[in-house]
Image (tube, coloured by chain):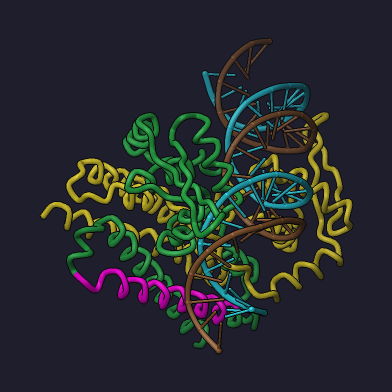
Chain colours: A green, B yellow, C brown, D cyan
DNA sequence: AGCGATTATGTATTTATTTACATATTCGCA
DNA sequence: TGCGAATATGTAAATAAATACATAATCGCT
């Protein structure tokens, strides 16, 4: 199960700010939210359907161009109540960490195995890439201080993600340096 | 799919050091490996069976007491080859982060919502607990410097996990302090 | 000798998630 | 005006993972 249908609450949370289409939600996961939550559109659309059926949200259509309709979803009182409950509830247990990089490192084990250096180079490269992306997001969204106050939670978790990447890179480089000795 | 059957390679990696039973593997996941990889026994036993069928590993029985048999698994040449291939392969794409704490923070958004403080207290408590556990593991396994060399990969990733928790706690406490202003 | 915790191994069911399949319209641009 | 990218929405199939169901022997202790 992994996460006790957190997607439902994430969707409720997003809809509690404004009406959105399934596509909007998909775009949010691909963009600014992607570093904290993600679901494929093949999960999003059925979930929205189920939520309408259970009365948590309602739907209305809008027309784009000549014939294309898009469906917006609105949170309903029942949905607001469930969202509030979830926010109050204690956090679920931390899901088990599954880290392929660490696992390979553990299995290689021998300091002199040339694959270890390759592994570090690879891991560093991808975390550098991620850090750059996150920093560009920060610049784009929160250069204006007023925005940091307005979207406090968002600013906080973006700061956290940036820190996480910086720290990971720091550790990776330290260990890499040790390997060179 | 999430992880392209990494469990198979993890099992191969573990068996490349020594023969193990399914229960041994389960115990490793519950113990020293649990911070880097984890699977339930309901996944482990069927996976071992499949691996025997495909010739990656072989099985032999041992008797405990009067009638209890336990099954050990041995890596076969084909398994060694597949393991070596996997270790050489580039890492799979980073799985999407799904962080319930961050998600709640994002959704709460309002600095003054009293739930934010509660959320931080909770998150700090559980990371403190995890850090303590990891530190006790380090003490137990690597107080002797010789062990750090012998199990280089293991020492490395345990250090990393400890760092990760320390850093996360540092960030959490910083943000918490900001909230008090 | 008995009892509870641990060892040991499995299957069944449900849920979550990914990948692939599938289709149609609209927007921006050259 | 034509074409490719983006918008928009779905379903199907496969895999990964969690939870629940199930059973039986052994070890350590009192």
Q: Residues in magenta?
A: A119-144
Q: Quadrant of residue B134?
A: bottom left
Residue A170 % position (x, y): 39, 76
Judged left or right of residue B111, residue D7 is right
Let me know if residue B38 is in the magenta part.
no
Image position, residue B2 (x, y; %): 63, 56
Question: Does any portion of residue A133 appear in the rendered image?
Answer: yes
Any part of residue B170 in sight: no
**Where residue B91 sits in the image (x, y, percent)?**
62, 71
**Tag count in the figure?**
0
Going 43% across and 52% down the picture, which residue do you hit? Answer: B99
The residue depicted at 70 percent of the width and 76 percent of the height is B88
In the image, is residue A173 above or below residue A11? below
Q: Nearer the viewer, residue C2 or B95?
A: B95
Query: Magenta stretch mostly in which secondary structure?
Result: helix
Q: Is residue C9 above or below residue B132?
A: above
């Amino acid at each position: 199960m992994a996460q006790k249908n957190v997607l439902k609450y994430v969707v409720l949370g997003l809809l509690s700010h404004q009406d959105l289409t399934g596509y909007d939600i998909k775009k949010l996961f691909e963009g600014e939210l992607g570093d904290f939550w993600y679901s494929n559109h093949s999960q999003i659309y059925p979930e929205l359907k189920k939520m309408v059926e259970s009365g948590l949200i309602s739907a209305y259509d809008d027309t784009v161009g000549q014939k294309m309709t898009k469906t917006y979803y609105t949170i309903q009182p029942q949905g607001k109540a469930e969202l509030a409950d979830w926010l109050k509830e204690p956090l679920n247990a931390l899901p088990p960490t599954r880290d392929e990089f660490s696992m390979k490192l553990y299995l290689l084990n021998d300091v002199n195995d040339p694959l270890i250096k390759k592994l570090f180079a690879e891991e560093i490269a991808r975390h550098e890439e991620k850090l750059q992306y996150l920093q560009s997001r920060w610049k784009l969204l929160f250069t204006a201080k007023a925005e940091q106050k307005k979207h406090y939670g968002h600013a906080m978790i973006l700061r956290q993600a940036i820190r996480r990447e910086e720290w990971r890179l720091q550790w990776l480089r330290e260990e890499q340096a040790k390997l060179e000795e």
